[in-house]
Image: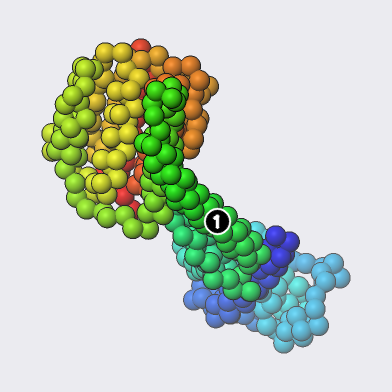
Amino acid sequence: MLRLFVSLYLLLIISISAINGLSEKLWQSLNMAPSSQIIAIEQVANSLALTLNSQNVERLSKRLELTISPQNSNDIALLDWQEQALARQEAVMTVDEHDEIYAYVQPQSQLYLVGPFYQESQNNIIKPLIFLVSYLCLAGIIALWIWPLWRDLKSLQLASDHFSQGGQAAPIPVNKRSTIAPVLTTFNAMTAQISRHIDEQRQLTNAVSHEIRTPLSRLKFTFAMLDKEHVPQLPCMRQDVVELERLVDEMLNYGRLESQNDNLHMEDVNISELATHLVDKLTRHHQVNVTRNITENIICRCDGHLIERALQNYITNALRYAQSQVTVTITQTNNQVIFYVEDDGHGIDESQRELVFQAFTRLDKSRNKDNGGFGLGLAIVKRIAQWHQGECSVDSSALNGAKFSLSIPKSPQ
């Protein structure tokens, strides 16, 4: 960061100094050629230097409408070349602090001050134009300095967004001359380490899940050989094995979804038809009353299989905890498709609403183990929402239960 500050500071100081110097030289060079008014004034002043004397001072002053006043040469500090010009009876031009032009003339050893001379006002655009060009040059220099920084920061932002959505962390090329080279190097090391830990965790989960299947199969075979009369706990033991098998299946499915981000099959999907068929399938043999408010012909570019999986998890979750009523609402805006699934169950406390989307998270009260589930269904919904650049949340429902929402863009970038 110190290097960044020093380079910007030196750039501004050097650029401003150079541009000011060049602007001043340009202004001086453009003003070296006298204008027609200045030439005319010099001609009048030189004529007065030859013709002026004590007898015609007043007459010439009235005729030319100029103030001509005698001066004491001892009170005026003149340069050597100015004294030599006066001695040759030439006029010496001068400009005061108000940019008014005067002339010194010395006919017959008497010094006179003539002026100020009248000048027609002119709209000189040269000076504002020079200022404009100077500022544009400074802006261009700063832009050239900022461009590599902006490019590197943009690469860092894109890589961060891709990685945060579950994508593979490709290393960002690092130019040693870049002002944020240490930041890029640290980011590459961090993402590589996180990716390694995620891969190791995923491999461990898959390995454990597969390894558990073998002893579970042995237990099921053993249970089949046992006599139910001699082992009264056999039904409970079988139920525990079934629950372990379901847990293994959920873990494997979650692991497969975790690695699916780079293989999304994006296409135009009719969300209305997909949701209608899904609701019919899930509620065909269910006693809960399901109300559908689905807008017709909602077209969205997405992975239809994953969106169906997310909506299925929402509806299954609502059917599990509802008392008698579930409402499925799907609507759209100009840029988004929004899913709402509500139930009339016990709801979720506000302090626990962020936790339900975390993997293997189970709430104690109404959503207990007796209702089934392993805390992976809503975590899968959150992953699918992130992969589609959307959001998911839970709130209170008008049915006095929970209201789950999922919003995804119609055309994700």
Q: Residue 330 lies in what quarter of the image?
A: top left
The spot of residue 188 in percent (x, y) is: 58, 63
* Mark 1 Cα-neighbour bin, 10 Å: few <14, some 14–19, many ≥20: few
**In terms of depth relative to the viewer, which is nearer, 277 or 408?**
277
342 lies left or right of 62:
left
Residue 76 position by quadrant:
bottom right
Q: Is residue 371 visible?
A: yes
Residue depicted at 72% across the width and 70% down the height: 112
- Residue 277 location in percent, x, y? 15, 35
Q: Tell me which residue sits at (70%, 73%) in the image.
A: 104
Q: Is residue 108 above or below residue 112?
A: below
Q: Position of residue 158 (x, y in %)?
A: 46, 58
Residue 102 is drawn in which quadrant? bottom right
Tell me if residue 396 comes above or below residue 52 in the rendering: above
Q: Residue at x 24, y 25 (%)?
A: 328
User: Which residue sits furthest right?
Assistant: 74
Q: Nearer the viewer, residue 135 or 116?
A: 135
Tell me: 33 left or right of 227.
Answer: right
At x 72% / y 87%, what residue is drawn? 88
Residue 17 visible in the current orientation: no
Q: Nearer the viewer, residue 102 or 15?
A: 15
Q: Amino acid at mark 1?
A: Glu
Mark 1: secondary structure: helix
Q: Which residue is mark 1?
A: 200
368 on left or right of 134: left
Q: Nearer the viewer, residue 146 or 382?
A: 382
Residue 403 at x, y = what percent?
A: 35, 22
